[in-house]
């Protein structure tokens, strides 16, 4: 990733991975390139659900980058699913990830 692109990021760049905490097996750790970014507890969830959530969160940087690439692709503006613009769905997801929408 270029220095210019890194300066745009407000989150820790990926890749992120998921690991089970050795000391507390009920915790899933989401690990960034340099440190642990997040620990999830399974107190209210099953271990399987906790790990699935952790994997989804860990994939977020790559999914955001993929959405940004798709948003720039010719023809996306014309695609619809169930009458909803794919471009609108992509724009909303990117805005949410960047803290500009809910």
Image: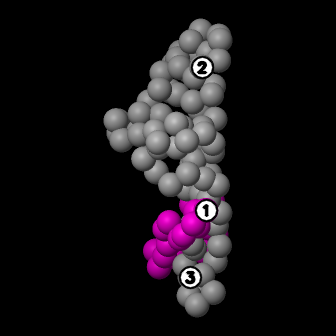
Residue found 57% across the figure and 30% down from its top: 68
Q: Secondary structure at mark 3?
A: loop
Asked if the magenta segment contains residue 53, the reply would be yes
Real-space CA distance between mark 1 and mark 3, rounded to the nearest whole angstrom: 23 Å
Which quadrant would residue 57 be assigned to in this image?
bottom right
Q: Is residue 87 above or below residue 33?
A: above
Real-space CA distance between mark 2 and mark 3, rounded to the nearest whole angstrom: 41 Å
Q: Which residue is mark 3?
A: 26
Where is residue 91? Give x, y as percent.
47, 26
* First reached walking from the N terminus: tag 1 or tag 2: 1
Q: Which residue is mark 1?
A: 33
* Residue numbers of the magenta segment: 31-56
Residue found 57% across the figure and 74% down from its top: 28
Q: Is residue 94 visible?
A: yes
Colour mapping used in the image: one colour
In this view, the mark in front (1 or 2): 1
Image mark for residue 72: 2
Is the C-beta separation of discs 1 and 2 under 8 Å?
no
* First reached walking from the N terminus: tag 1 or tag 3: 3
Residue found 47% across the figure and 34% down from its top: 94
Badge 1: residue crowd in 10 Å (few <14, some 14–19, many ≥20): few
Q: Secondary structure at mark 2?
A: loop
């Amino acid at each position: 990733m270029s220095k210019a692109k890194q300066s745009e990021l407000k989150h820790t760049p990926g890749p992120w991975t998921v690991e089970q905490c050795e000391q507390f097996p009920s915790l899933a750790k989401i690990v960034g390139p340099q440190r642990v970014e997040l620990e999830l507890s399974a107190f209210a969830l099953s271990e399987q659900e906790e790990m699935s959530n952790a994997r989804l969160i860990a994939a977020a940087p790559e999914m955001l980058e993929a959405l940004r690439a798709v948003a720039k692709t010719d023809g996306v503006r014309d695609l619809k699913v169930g009458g909803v613009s794919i471009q609108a769905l992509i724009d909303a997801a990117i805005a949410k990830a960047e803290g500009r929408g809910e």
